[in-house]
Structure formats: C-alpha cells, structure tokens
Amino acid sequence: MPFFGNLDIFSRLTEGLPLPTNLYSFIFYAALLYATLMTLALLYHWFRFSPGVIRTSLVMLIYLGGTGFLLLAAFGLMAASL
Amino acid sequence: MAHIPLDPDEKVLFLVRKHWFMFLLEVLVIILAALAPAVFYPSLFTQASTFFFYTLWLLIMWITFFVRWTDYYLDVWIITDKKIIDAQLIRLFNRRVVSARLDRIQDITVSIKGIFPMLLGYGNLHIQTAGDSEDIIIEYASRPEHIKEKILKVHNRAAEERLYRL
C-alpha cells in the first residue's frame, strides 16, 4: 500500500473529491523545505557577491515578503482543505 | 565590488551587464507559466484544495523569478584601469571569474545579429587576448560599439603606460 493510498490526485481534484489529509500537510512541508533551502541559497549569493548592502537588503526584503505571503496563503488554504 | 580580485591601486572604470531585454524574455516566460493554470482551469479558485496547489505553483514561480534575477544581476563584466574581469554566475553555487590584462588585448569584434538586437541596440563583444589567456566574450551588451570604443581607449592608455615603463 503506498503512503497516500492508490490515488490519482489530478482526477480527484478535478472531480471535487477530497484528498487524504496527510497529503496536504506532506506537500506543504515539502514546499516549506524547498522555500527555506532556496532562500538560504539566494541569501548566500546576494550577501557574498552583491556590490551593496542596501540594494541586497531591498531585494531580499521583497523576496522574503512575497515568499512569506505565499507560504501563509498556502497554509491557510491547506487548513481550509482539511 | 565584493569578491573580485583587484590590485590595491586598481580602479573600477565601468561595469557591463546583459541588456535588460534578455531578462525581460525570461520574466515573460515565468509570468506566462504562472498564469497558465488560472487561464486554462479558471474553476481552480472555487475549491480550497485546487487553490492550495495553485498557491504552491505561484511560490515556485516566485522563487524561480528571483533565481533568474540573481543570475542576471551577478553576471557582470568589470573594466578597470588594468584589466577586464568576466564574472559569471553559471547557476547557483557555480561561479566563474576570468580576467585579462588590458595591454594583452589584441582585437575586439562586435557582432549584432537579429531583429531585436538591431532595434534595441545590443550585441556581443569578442575580446581576443594575446598568448594562452582565454578570450573574453561579453554577451548581449547594450551599445556594444560604444563599449568597444571605451575599452580601446583604456587599452591604448594601458599600452602607452607599459611603453613608458620599458
């Protein structure tokens, strides 16, 4: 038996059928991990190779603002889907 | 300029980056990819579950945009009063820095090919250097003819200074 059972995510979504609750949290945590790793990689490159602290901070603030907003929205929608 | 090897008395004269149009093309692809699910499957906003997956897709596109921006911004050619430095971020955690002394420059070739390069005024500069040192290619630079003139001017100055020293 696979971890999430034998299921076709896309067909279930298009037919409006519910997905197992552990699938949403698993996908959300995978996205959170991906966002964290990419944020660390971008921070490393900008602070190491960038010519100015002010410009770097501005770019990183915009990036972190957008990433945080999308992660919060995904978390809210995950909670609403359960 | 952080993490670029410069001599203590070396001065940065100017920087060259790729033309903004090259970045705009990448941004357009990202925007199209971000909007495609909403355009082809508009009912995804009616259910929280489908909206959840679309939000994660937007997150991936947002991060991809910043990775491409970082790649664009950190690809730079630095012209100092002594050398040309080609600093390229090939991908994340893969960076290449090549430099050539100005007095080693033998020839600079400008190539502008295509409709958009002609209209927007960008092209490639091939800087040939003497000896075993690697040639430097400045890709998609805006106003390449102007950059060539500026490089040749500082090259002539560097060559004259070298002659006086001899």
Image (cartoon, coloured by chain):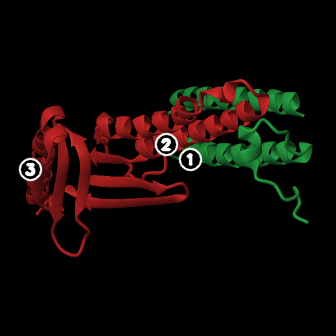
The answer to whether residue B82 is seen in the rendering is no
Q: Is residue A17 visible?
A: yes
What residue did someone put label 1 on? A45
Q: Of the two numbered discs 3 and 2 on the same chain, state the one appearing first in sequence.
A: 2
User: A61 or A56, which lies in front?
Assistant: A61
Q: Amino acid at mark 2?
A: Thr
Q: Which residue occupies the foreground of this view, B99 or B37?
A: B37
B30 is higher (above) or lower (below) than B166: above
Chain identifier for the green-coloured part of the image: A
Q: Amino acid at mark 3?
A: Asn
- In the image shown, does B118 or B15 lie closer to the viewer? B118
SS state under label 3: helix
- Please provide percent x and percent y for residue B50: 72, 34
- Kindly identify the residue that appears in the image at 57 percent across and 39 percent down: B61
Q: Are the two marked residues, 2 and 1, in contact with CB atoms closer than 8 angstroms?
A: yes
The quarter of the rendered structure image containing the C terminus of chain A is: top right
